[in-house]
Image (cartoon, coloured by chain):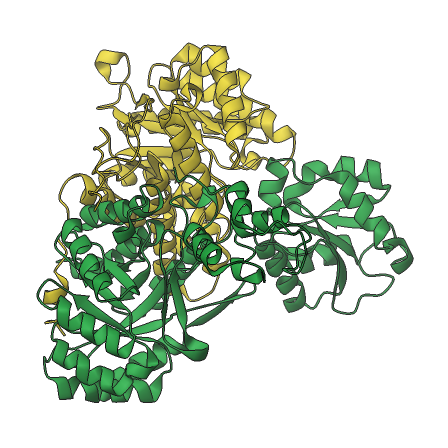
Chain colours: A yellow, B green
């Protein structure tokens, strides 16, 4: 009888570690930095080995025009119109380890007043909270002009946040240069977004590496959909990218991210029944994050604080204090 | 990764007559079909018994397929061939079983069964539902167990899992429901011989439970010696990390290392997780269930049926078991919604099944009559296909032409999804039709038409 395997593959590659947030000694004003990546094994392959850094969670804060469903508007209340206060609340009340300041849709970037206002918000958030920041621009390109808006606002963000090592993006295969260069110059890691295609991810990473960035300055978003509309692509693309990187493809050796917040766009959550919808939504978000994390995501960008808390619990359960299971025999004794 | 059998390996064992009686013109083509799982060796009328056996062994999935229940409600689990869905696909969907205890009152049992059976969702042409009931003997009393089973049987035809540590109780239960081919568990080092006898006698599958994988393998070897082969493994582990490790080793051990004693589907108990905080307890069961779904959990036992928890789990299961080689898609072409006339709008969407179902349903709800052109994007959603350049403006133009839309309406305007806005110009150029960019969300089509269509 053959013995139990303790390892299935010897991996030649490993994911590089990316640091988000710069402290005073590093020239920034964050009170700590967060390191993600460094994976040497597939996620949760504890029998082969434990990866150095558990997945981390960023709480999303929207800079106006938050595309939230009704139940979330109720939950966040006045914060929706006040990104600075929302950031503060995320850190102080909801214990966010990182904040993802989402400059949301291209509509907000449509005129000079708004652009000025967004710049002010970024500056104020940097003052208000001292956790590492992610700054995300137009995640959903609808027309060609959106690339320009995204470039403009993110290049500006890179300047404002100089020295803070914020994760800035997304950059796209056909619009990466301006933002990439700004991040290189101002020392920010870059969020590289492609859609469910390993080759696209390779192409974009290659471009960024050619610009002079390294894998230690890139986080990949290869996801396409949350639970209910295409999470199967998200799961498999994340898995394929991670396996390929571990097997030695140097170009893909950067950590990846999942946006569990995308879950709230699911059709099933647009119903009227408020309380149930909120709880269902939290579960959608948690399951989306779990799917991402189990396929190899190193960061979850999350929206509902309760979901973020649960995702954190899930991760801690693997890396810190595992919850015990009762035995089947014990189960057979409990009603 | 698992080494795949090559068609040449199969071809060697075939008669090489190219008679075509199997339904495929040549033996080589037949060999390819077998490898793809689209043909069965027994379709060949000229195979010797010896060659047939050899072929069946060669082509048998590394994870044994187990059937539970009989007739219309029979379920199948296992039969898996890969550890990563992108390598091929996962074959038999994980099953959700709902827990029932013999300490529950008959009213409670009936209520729970009713709730479980009523939970059904129609989605992308599939019915998502709960599949089984796991009835456990907590009382330790065989009569009480049988009594409970009587109530259960009166109210459901779904397959059963009988759980008791006492073989005597299981025997009594099997005398009552044995013909329905339930799954019995747990087989442990304490009861393996008696359980093997029961499994043999009643032809029921069993689930083994050991404190580590070595013990599990020993138990399985013992069962095999009795001639019992329909087996599920309860992955050993004291916490989620352990269990996920066990599940991974079981699947990859079976698929890649060809360890026969690990080549069985699994039975998992997310409901066994110990959580003190009452508020998070429900969530924990769902989170553990999701982790199991993503890592080779076969039958998943749930303690409660609450919509906010079961719905997302169902969706996750559906997603994971979709064949990644063929996204759920519908046939591209013209779909007539309502009863359109020559003034009705023409719209376009993609052939991702979910997209089509959402859009057509929204159109129906809003009472809109239209010609809906479904363009081939290889089964991708609007968002994804736009990002991946999978909407070809030429094919949109071709669709318009092939379906003779010009003869059906007396305008030349096509409404495209808001998310495909950037393709508008190109579609106009190649088709010669005017493009109107519709809303992002198909629920807003009515409002859109009122503003942009009816006023024209």
Q: In this view, does B150 lie to the left or right of B326?
A: left
Residues B68 and A231: in front is: B68
Residues B24 and B266: in front is: B24
Q: Is residue B430 left or right of residue A214?
A: right
Where residue A331 sits: x, y (%)?
14, 67
- Asked if residue A277 can be seen in this view, the reply is no
- In which image quadrant can residue B234 be found? bottom left
Q: In this view, does A149 lie to the left or right of B293?
A: right
- Asked if residue A244 can be seen in this view, the reply is yes
Point 28% across, 82% down: residue: B178
Where residue A136 sits: x, y (%)?
45, 31
Where residue B193 sits: x, y (%)?
14, 69
Point 56% across, 55% down: residue: B38
Point 34% across, 54% down: residue: B293
Look at the picture and state if B328 lies above or below B133: above
Residues B56 and A286: in front is: B56
Look at the picture and state if A39 lies above or below B35: above
How many numbered badges does the structure rendering display? 0
Where residue A50 sits: x, y (%)?
21, 33
Look at the picture and state if B283 lies above or below A218: below
Residues B409 and B96: in front is: B96
Look at the picture and state if A165 lies above or below B424: above
């Amino acid at each position: 009888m053959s013995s139990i395997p303790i390892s299935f593959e010897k991996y030649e590659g490993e994911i590089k570690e990316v640091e988000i947030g710069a402290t005073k000694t590093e020239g920034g004003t964050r009170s700590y930095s967060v390191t993600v990546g460094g994976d040497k094994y597939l996620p949760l392959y504890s029998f082969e080995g434990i990866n150095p850094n558990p997945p981390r969670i960023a709480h999303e804060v929207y800079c106006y025009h938050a595309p939230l469903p009704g139940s979330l508007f109720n939950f966040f209340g006045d914060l929706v119109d006040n990104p600075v206060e929302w950031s503060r609340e995320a850190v102080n009340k909801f214990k966010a380890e990182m904040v993802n300041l989402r400059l949301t849709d291209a509509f907000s970037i449509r005129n000079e007043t708004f652009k000025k206002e967004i710049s002010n918000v970024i500056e104020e958030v940097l003052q208000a909270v001292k956790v590492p920041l992610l700054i995300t621009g137009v995640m959903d390109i609808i027309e060609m002009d959106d690339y320009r808006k995204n470039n403009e606002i993110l290049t500006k963000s890179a300047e404002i946040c100089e020295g803070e090592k914020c994760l800035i993006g997304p950059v796209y295969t056909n619009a990466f240069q301006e933002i990439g260069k700004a991040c290189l110059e101002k020392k920010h890691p870059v969020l590289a977004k492609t859609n469910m295609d390993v080759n696209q991810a390779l192409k974009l990473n290659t471009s960024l590496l050619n610009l002079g960035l390294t894998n230690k300055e890139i986080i990949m978003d290869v996801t396409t959909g949350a639970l209910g509309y295409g999470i199967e692509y998200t799961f498999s693309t994340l898995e394929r990218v991670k396996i390929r990187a571990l097997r030695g493809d140097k170009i893909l050796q950067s950590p990846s991210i999942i946006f569990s917040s995308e879950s709230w766009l699911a059709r099933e959550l647009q119903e009227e029944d408020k309380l149930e919808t909120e709880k269902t939504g939290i579960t959608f978000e948690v399951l989306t994050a779990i799917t991402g994390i189990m396929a190899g995501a190193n960061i979850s960008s999350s929206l509902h604080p309760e979901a973020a808390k649960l995702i954190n619990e899930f991760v801690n359960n693997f890396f810190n204090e595992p919850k015990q299971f009762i035995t089947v025999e014990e189960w057979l004794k409990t009603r | 990764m698992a080494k795949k059998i090559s068609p040449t390996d199969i071809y060697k064992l075939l008669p090489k007559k190219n008679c075509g009686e199997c339904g495929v013109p040549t033996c080589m083509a037949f060999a390819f079909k077998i490898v793809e799982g689209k043909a069965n060796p027994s379709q060949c009328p000229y195979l010797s018994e010896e060659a047939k056996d050899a072929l069946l062994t060669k082509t048998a999935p590394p994870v044994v397929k187990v059937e539970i229940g009989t007739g219309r409600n029979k379920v199948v689990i296992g039969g898996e061939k890969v550890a990563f869905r992108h390598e091929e696909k996962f074959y038999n969907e994980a099953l959700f079983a709902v827990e029932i205890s013999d300490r529950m009152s008959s009213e409670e049992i009936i209520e729970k069964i009713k709730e479980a059976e009523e939970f059904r969702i129609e989605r992308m042409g599939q019915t998502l539902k709960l599949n089984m009931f796991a009835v456990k003997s907590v009382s330790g009393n065989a009569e009480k167990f049988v009594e409970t089973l009587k109530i259960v049987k009166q109210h459901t035809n779904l397959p059963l899992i009988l759980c008791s540590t006492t073989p005597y109780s299981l025997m009594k239960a099997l005398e009552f429901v044995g013909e329905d081919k339930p799954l019995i568990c747990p087989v442990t080092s304490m009861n393996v011989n008696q359980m093997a006898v029961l499994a043999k006698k009643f032809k029921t599958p069993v689930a083994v439970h050991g404190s580590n994988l070595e013990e599990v393998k020993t138990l399985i070897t013992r069962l095999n010696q009795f001639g019992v082969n329909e087996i599920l493994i309860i992955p050993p582990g004291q916490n989620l990390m352990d269990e996920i490790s066990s599940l991974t080793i079981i699947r990859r051990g079976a698929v890649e290392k060809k360890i026969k004693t690990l080549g069985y589907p699994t039975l998992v108990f997310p409901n066994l997780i110990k959580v003190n905080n009452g508020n998070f307890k429900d969530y924990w069961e769902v989170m553990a269930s999701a982790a199991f779904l993503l890592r080779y959990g076969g039958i998943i036992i749930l303690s409660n049926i609450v919509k906010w928890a079961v719905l997302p789990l169902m969706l996750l299961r559906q997603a994971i078991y979709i064949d990644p080689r063929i996204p759920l898609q519908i046939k591209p072409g013209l779909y007539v919604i309502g009863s359109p006339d020559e003034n009705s709008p023409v719209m376009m969407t993609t052939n991702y099944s979910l997209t089509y179902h959402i859009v057509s349903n929204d159109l129906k709800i809003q009472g809109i009559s239209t010609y809906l052109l479904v363009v081939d994007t290889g089964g991708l959603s609007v968002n994804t296909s736009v990002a991946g350049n999978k909407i070809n403006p030429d094919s949109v133009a071709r669709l318009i032409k092939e379906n003779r839309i010009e003869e059906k309406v007396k305008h030349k305007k096509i409404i495209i999804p808001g998310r495909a806005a950037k393709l508008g110009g190109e579609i106009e150029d190649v088709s010669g039709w005017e493009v109107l960019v519709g809303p992002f969300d198909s629920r807003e089509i009515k409002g859109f038409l009122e503003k942009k269509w009816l006023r024209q």
